[in-house]
Structures are given as C-alpha cells and as structure tokens.
C-alpha cells in the first residue's frame, strides 16, 4: 500500500540562517551509533540541558498554551512537527497535518460553523492524555533515553528541565491558575493509552471526532515522571 501527503512547503517561512528538520529526526541514530540530537547540541555550543530547554520552549510551551488557554488539542508527534533551527538550536516549530486528531474541548468556545465539528466532549480524567500520551509517552521519553545513553542529560535532569519549562510557563499566565490546578501535569500517574491498537483496530480512522475518548485503548497506568518535581512538594 502506498500513500502520499501534500504538505505546504515551510521553506518560504524561513529567515536567513535558519534551516529545517522534522522533529522525528531527533530520535535518529546513524550507522555509527551517533544520535542526530547530539550533533545538534554539539553544533549549538550550548550545554545539553540548555539546548533541551530551548527545544522545550519551542515545542512544549505552544502545546501547553493551546491546551490551557484554548482547550485545543491535537497530535503533535515527531513527523507532524517541523523544527526551525539556527546553528543547531530550535527556534520555533511548525505544526503540520493536524487533521482527525484535533479537538476543542470546550462548550463555550466560539467556533466558525465550518469547524464546529472539531468540538468534542471529553471526560475530565481523559483530557490531559493529549499531552501525557502524545508528548510525554510517545516522544519525550524516547528523546530522554537517547540523551541519557549518550551521557548528555541524565533522566533526572531531563525531566527536571521539562518540569521547569512547565512551571515557568504557568508563572507567565497566572490568569490560568484554576486550569493548572484542575488539570495538573504533576499528578502521580496517568493512563497508558495504546495508539498502535487504534490503528490496528481501524486503519481508516483512528478516532471518532464526536467521541475521541471513546476510541481509546487503555492498558493500566504509567508513572508520571513530573510528579517528583511537583511545585511546593518538599517531600520529593
């Protein structure tokens, strides 16, 4: 089976000195065992944790704001995200192929009639899976393993950097404090959602936009790596 996607070219959006890479490339390791992410860090001249924070500011912060400010979720995995780099440092991201996975989880949001269909009712305990599954479980944990194996950023330092990115974002928008408390990224665990099972069950449509949570295939729980960095929790 063959398939093709027509993508709008991101090249015209580049400034002088910028170049592109899919975010999936950060998980690539060459035939000699050298990760591309390590090459970007070396090119940048930054400390690995500093480079990681630049990447998180470019990638994670927009996703957090989409969720907390606009109740907007989608599936920003590696091949759907294009990194804009300058000297190996992520500057910003371009989000592509946002299709059936997109949803606005708000009854009050004003939506044009043409996109009203993306409004979805999602149970409270499932809302944050859009971040925990698509971002933490399906991408960041693999990048964490690569950087840790390369001796660049330990597991502890990696998730501490992610937690700092989250808390700094939250501090920048204090008007959303109620939402941060309601949908906390620092809970002890989250449900394990098996995305491959969605594809195997129905390779034409992963989810029903009218009931995206109803399609989820859950299998137990995962420990949340951010829980140990919960703000104000001196016991951790």
Image (cartoon, grey):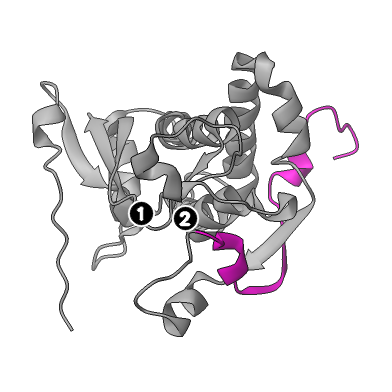
Q: Residue extending furthest front?
A: 113
Q: Is residue 230 visible?
A: no
Q: Is residue 89 visible?
A: yes
Q: Which residue is mark 2?
A: 139
Q: Which disc, if any, is residue 91?
A: none
Q: Quadrant of the C terminus?
A: top right
Q: Is residue 4 above or below residue 185?
A: below
Q: Residue at x 30, y 55 (%)?
A: 79
* Magenta stretch encompasses residue 152: no
Left or right placement of residue 184 versus residue 108 in this view: right
Residues 206 and 62: in front is: 206
Q: Which residues are magenta?
A: 210-236
Q: Do labels 1 and 2 touch, CB within 8 Å? A: yes
Residue 14 in which image quadrant: top left
Q: Which residue is mark 1?
A: 78
x and y percent of residue 143 in the render? 46, 53
* Magenta stretch encompasses residue 231: yes
Q: Is residue 139 above or below residue 12?
A: below
Disc 1 to disc 2, C-alpha distance: 7 Å
How dense is the environment of label 1, judged by Cα within 10 Å: few (below 14), some, or many (20 and up)?
many
């Amino acid at each position: 089976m063959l398939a093709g996607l027509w993508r709008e070219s991101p090249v015209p959006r580049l400034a002088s000195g910028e170049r592109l890479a899919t975010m999936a490339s950060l998980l690539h390791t060459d035939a000699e065992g050298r990760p591309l992410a390590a090459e970007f860090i070396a090119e940048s001249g930054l400390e690995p944790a500093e480079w990681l924070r630049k990447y998180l500011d470019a990638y994670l912060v927009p996703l957090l704001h989409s969720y907390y400010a606009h109740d907007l979720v989608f599936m920003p995995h590696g091949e759907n995200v294009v990194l804009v780099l300058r000297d190996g440092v992520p500057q910003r991201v371009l989000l592509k192929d946002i299709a059936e996975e997109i949803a606005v989880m708000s009854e009050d949001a004003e939506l044009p009639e043409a996109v009203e269909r993306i409004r979805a009712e999602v149970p409270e305990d499932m809302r944050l899976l859009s971040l925990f599954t698509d971002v933490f479980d399906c991408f960041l944990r693999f990048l964490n393993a690569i950087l840790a194996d390369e001796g660049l950023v330990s597991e502890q330092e990696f998730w501490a950097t992610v937690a700092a990115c989250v808390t700094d974002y939250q501090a920048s928008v204090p008007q959303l404090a109620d939402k941060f408390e309601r949908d906390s990224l620092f809970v002890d665990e989250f449900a394990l959602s098996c995305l491959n099972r969605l594809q195997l069950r129905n390779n034409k449509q992963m989810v029903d936009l009218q009931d995206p949570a109803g399609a989820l295939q859950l299998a137990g729980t995962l420990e949340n790596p951010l829980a140990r960095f919960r703000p104000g929790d001196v016991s951790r």
